[in-house]
Image: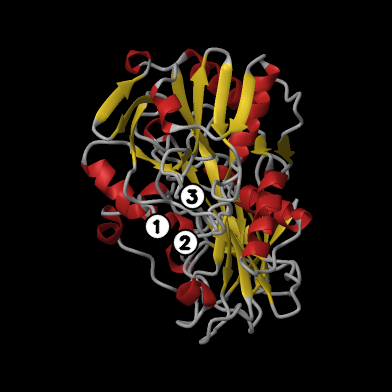
Amino acid sequence: MELRLASLSAAPPLPGCLPRHSLSPCLKIQSPIYSTPSLSYKVPGTRRCHASVATSYMETSEVADLDWENLGFGLIDTDFMYVAKCGPDGIFSKGEILPFGHIALSPSAGVLNYGQGLFEGLKAYRKTDGSILLFRPEENAIRMITGAERMCMPAPTVEQFIDAVKQTVLANKRWVPPTGKGSLYIRPLLMGSGAVLGLAPAPEYTFIIFVSPVGNYFKEGLSPINLIVEDKFHRASPGGTGGVKTIGNYASVLKAQKIAKGKGYSDVLYLDAVHDKYLEEVSSCNIFVVKGNVISTPAIKGTILPGITRKSIIEVAQSKGFKVEERLVSVDELLDADEVFCTGTAVVVSPVGSITYLGKRVEYGNQGVGVVSQQLHKSLTSLQMGVVEDCMGWTVQLESVGSAAKIQIRRQRSDQPDHSNSPRQTLEERRGEGIRDSEQSRP
């Protein structure tokens, strides 16, 4: 599979390729289109890197040189991102693979002034044979279309979404962690990039996908997390946007989450905004309550995000003989449960060790991993990583060229913005964000 990558002749060298003046003779580089003189350069860390004025080809190394044993959940700059534009006609361009980097936005962009933006999250896993699996990407595409309709935005089609995800993952194939060491987190982002002043839908939209290798979301890993039930703030209300993955939903939980983490809790569990007694969800994941052979989870009614991991766990649990109920679940039932766990793309399945509500702390399973949580976690992750046969038909296997992803690079059109000359954050600027410096993380 060949991926198209826009590039400027004045842009910095591609990841893995050194500036021309610092390269020693070794590898022949020439233009397959124009009869330009051939040059020879040595390029450490790559299998093959052909570069020229007009067209270049590159095959990236199979796996990046990272400390995979200590991979956390933070941004690690990878090589490429996908970008597509949409104008007033509501039709997205074909899209291109660009070097990962900063993007240019007008100060009056709709996403910056009125929060007109959505994002998705999904993962790619490396199987033991080296092939790459995606997990239910069509579900993310459908959810983005639903969210875009609510936010008065156009959205890529399901086919365009999935194709863009595939292109982005293959372009960054070397960043997919080895089997069992983590996953490649994929972040599709849809935003109103056009300039507006009055309150109105943006005249232009941008669809971006970037990726980052990640480990566990919570530092506890599969070990139980400790939650506090929020009794002052609410995440969403009826008629609002709690049921779609709009960017504003997440900014609004930061204050309560910061307070909770300052007290030693892992995260916050929200109650409904009407009765203040029914469970909604945790800041970024859904909640499940186990009592005997019955697993209960709050019903999707417009204030709760329809999680794809949530949907998958319901189906896996039912296939194993559990009775699953989607309904109103009271905080009293939560405190009387045998076991509690959370689900989400980032956390997958995370057991809850304790719940604190109005000063009362209830512990589950002596702070150990519950039997049901462990069983469902193993079943789902084994399927996601291709350890067991996918009888559900949920995974999508990616095909690449030979043993590495081949990327075709072409000259950037003059009417496209330069995404590669903007300065990156320094290590000192990133340290407070827990972001690994790209120069240290790349081979």
Read off the residue under disc 3: 44
Q: Nearer the viewer, residue 382 or 149?
A: 149
Q: Nearer the viewer, residue 186 or 293?
A: 293
Q: Position of residue 124 (x, y in %)?
A: 60, 40
| Mark 1 vs mark 3, CA separation in Å | 46 Å
Residue 316 picture quarter: top right
Q: Is disc 2 in contact with disc 3, using a CB cutoff of under 8 Å?
A: no
Which structural element holds mark 1? loop
Q: Position of residue 98 (x, y in %)?
A: 59, 65
Residue 30 picture quarter: bottom right
Which structural element holds mark 2? helix
Read off the residue under disc 1: 252
Read off the residue under disc 2: 248
- Looking at the image, residue 73 sits to the left or right of residue 298; the answer is left
Q: Amino acid at mark 3?
A: Pro
Of the two numbered discs 2 and 3 on the same chain, state the one appearing first in sequence. Answer: 3
